[in-house]
Structure formats: structure tokens, C-alpha cells
Image: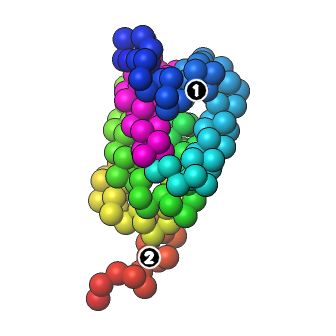
Amino acid sequence: MTSSGKMSEDASNQTLPSGIARGLGDKSYEKRKSASLEITSLVRTLQDRGDNDKIAGLITHIAREFVRHKNYNHRKGGLIGLAAVAIGLVSDIDKFLHTLVPPVLECFDDQESRVCYYACESMYNIVKVARGGILEYFNPLFDGVCCLFDHTDPDVKVSVPQTSPRTRTGVPAAAPSLPA
């Protein structure tokens, strides 16, 4: 789907099956969650095949067609989808952080508070999987988390402490590999 809501032929048919795409954009949390579970399974299958190009295309498609969509349900679904990709990647996540992290960070200051909440939840899952690999994004992540602590929506404020400890555990995990 494009930001206007129309399906783009190339990406939707080749990268993300239409049933999953419909589920990600649905207003029902349960349908978005179900679609995300299918994305995790799809990523694991692609990873087993060594098809990193399709994984990269999937991430790009979700970011472009969902996370940056004008409809907030699509943005929430896209954020859940990116978290699902991260969960599916496990040990290979470092190869894809450069495409996973920026769209989530962009949503930290979305005008819709529920999108901010989902961005925080998504980042929590990405950080949980990436561990020390997230250090490359430490400064923008820290800035984003600081802004979220000042958010007006109490649900967003409640989700921030979940992301913050994961970031703190990722830093010590990477410490042995940091240059002195």
C-alpha cells in the first residue's frame, strides 16, 4: 500500500503476502498481532534460505507502506511488523538495524499518542533482540526516550521504562567489544 492507501504492485505481491498486509493495516489489535506472528514466521523462513535481500525488502516495504502511512492503524501495524521482523531475525539482526531502527525512532514523536506507545513497544523488542548491536543508535535512541518521558499521554510514559532498562542491558553486553 502507498501512503494514499493504494496497493503498490511490486512490493505487496512479492514481499508481503496480501493477507498479512491486510492484517497489519486492520483496526483490530488482534488482527495486527496475528499478522505480526506470520511476519516472524516468514522472516525465519527467509533467514533459513539465506534470502537477506527479501528480508531487507520486507523491512523497507513495512517502513514505507505502513510505518509512514497516513492512517494511524497502519502505522501501529507497521511498528508491530518491524518488531516481528526483529524477533524473527534473532542472531542476524545486526545486518538489518540500519533499516529497522530509523522508522521506529521517527514514530517516537508521532502526533497520535498510541503510535508513540507502539513505537516504544517496537523499540523494546528490537533492543531486546539486538542487545549490544543497538549501540550504534544509542544517541538518537537516548534522545527519543528522553522526549517520551515528557510525553503528555500517561500510557506512553508507562511504556518508556520498559525500553530504558533494555537499552541499559544492551550497553554492558557490548562493553567487552568496545575499543578502549
What residue type is disc 1 on?
Pro
Q: Secondary structure at mark 2?
A: helix
Name which of mark 2 and mark 1 comes first in the sequence. Answer: 1
Please state the horizontal and vertical placement of residue 25, each as a whole percent of the image: 55, 21
Could you tell me residue 110's position as x and y percent?
Answer: 37, 30
Q: Residue at x 66, y 36 (%)?
A: 38
Q: Which disc, if any, is residue 138?
A: none
Q: In the image, what residue occupies the spot 63% across and 21% down?
A: 19
Along the viewing direction, whichever of 151 and 63 lies nearer the viewer: 63
How far apart in space, not on screen, are marks 2 and 1 (Cα)?
A: 36 Å
Instruction: Estimate how packed mark 1 is, as few (under 14), some (14 to 19) or many (20 or more) residues with alpha carbons within 10 Å.
Output: some
Report the residue marked by disc 2: 174
Residues tagged 2 and 1 counted as in contact (Cβ below 8 A): no
Q: Is residue 61 magenta?
A: yes
* Residue 10 % position (x, y): 41, 23
As drawn, which residue projects farthest toward the front?
A: 49
Asked whether 41 or 129 is in front, the reply is 41
Can residue 50 be seen by looking at this rendering? yes
When the figure is inspected, residue 176 is found, relative to residue 71, above or below; the finding is below
Which residue is label 1 attached to?
Answer: 17
Magenta part of the chain: 53-74
Q: Main secondary structure of the magenta part?
A: helix
